[in-house]
Image (tube, grey):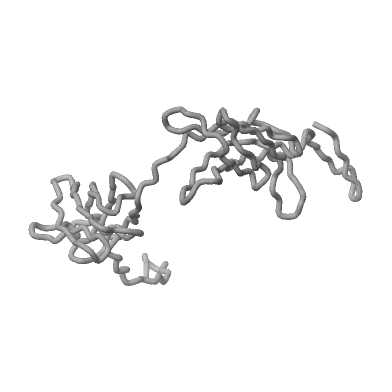
Amino acid sequence: MLVGGGANAFVYRTEAYEEKELEPNQKYFSYLYTDRSTYLPTDRINVFGALTARREEFLIRPGGRVTLKLGDIMEVPVRLDRYGCFEASLEIDGMYGGTELTLCVGGEVIFTKYISFEEYDREKYDFNATTDRLVYHIGEEVAVNASVSTLDGSPVDGMGINGAGGQVDVTTDKNGMASGSFTADVWTYDGYYNWTPNSDYNWFQLTNRDEYLQEVSTQTVVLPSTVMLEYEIIDEGTVGFKPD
């Protein structure tokens, strides 16, 4: 480009690029909401969503085809209101595993959401576990108390409880109670600890049931050190430390 004025003129060059073609999902603001993320094999999926064009050229005209697809199993049309919102219900039967729920415009995928299907596992027992406190120094003993009862409140005798990486392996008494302990520790890559407190969850599970898994967790915070050291460089070969 030449820019001039009288005897003064200068030339500069700039590069121009062809406008990038947008992907289908870049043409719209969109989202899909489902009432749950997991459904029974035979169930109803309630879907709510929104779809709005980013540019006027992508506006959905009367007769435009907007659909919801559930994997390759079914496809249903949806109708947008004046705000671009919609709702729909999908009846399913005999579904297992998971699949994608997609919002499509003219057959092009605009938004995708994954949903899964499985039978619900109802808890068989009232299972609780607690520790004697929340914060521990590394190497201290963490006392664990657990209780197991049926849903009508009856204590469960002889129920095995395992957890904390195998450090706890106990059995409930006639009152449905059990106690154990494990050592507070912090996992490291190289065996060296820093001063940062570490928060973690310790999992415990009932062990002598057939084809049934029930777990609970407790939180602990482990302090790797009781002392924090500040340092100062005294000279090129000397570093001094002082407790804080």
**Residue 95 percent location from the top left of the image:** 29, 58
- Quadrant of the frame with the C terminus: top right
Q: Residue at the location (32% across, 60% down)? A: 99
Q: How many marks?
A: 0
Of 24 and 115, nearer the camera is 115
Q: Position of residue 164 (x, y in %)?
A: 64, 43
Find the residue positioned furthest to the left: 62
Decide which of 1, 194 is in the foreground and name it.
194
Position of residue 156 in the picture relative to residue 123 (left or right) = right
Question: Would residue 79 appear left or right of 177 to someone viewing this image?
Answer: left
Q: Say if 100 sits above or below 17 in the image.
A: above
Q: Residue at x 50, y 46 (%)?
A: 209
Picture quarter containing residue 59?
bottom left
Rendered image quadrant of residue 94: bottom left
Is residue 65 placed above or below 181 in the rendered structure?
below
Q: Is residue 47 left or right of residue 189?
A: left
Examine the rendering and report whether any part of residue 10 can be seen. Answer: yes
**Foreground of the two, 76 or 235:** 76
Residue found at x 86% / y 39%:
241
Q: Nearer the viewer, residue 242 or 116?
A: 116
**Which quarter of the image is occupied by the N terminus?**
bottom left
x and y, in percent, of residue 217 in the image: 55, 39
Residue at left 22%, top 52%? 52
Relative to 153, 202 lies left or right: right
Would residue 11 be visible to someone looking at this image?
A: no
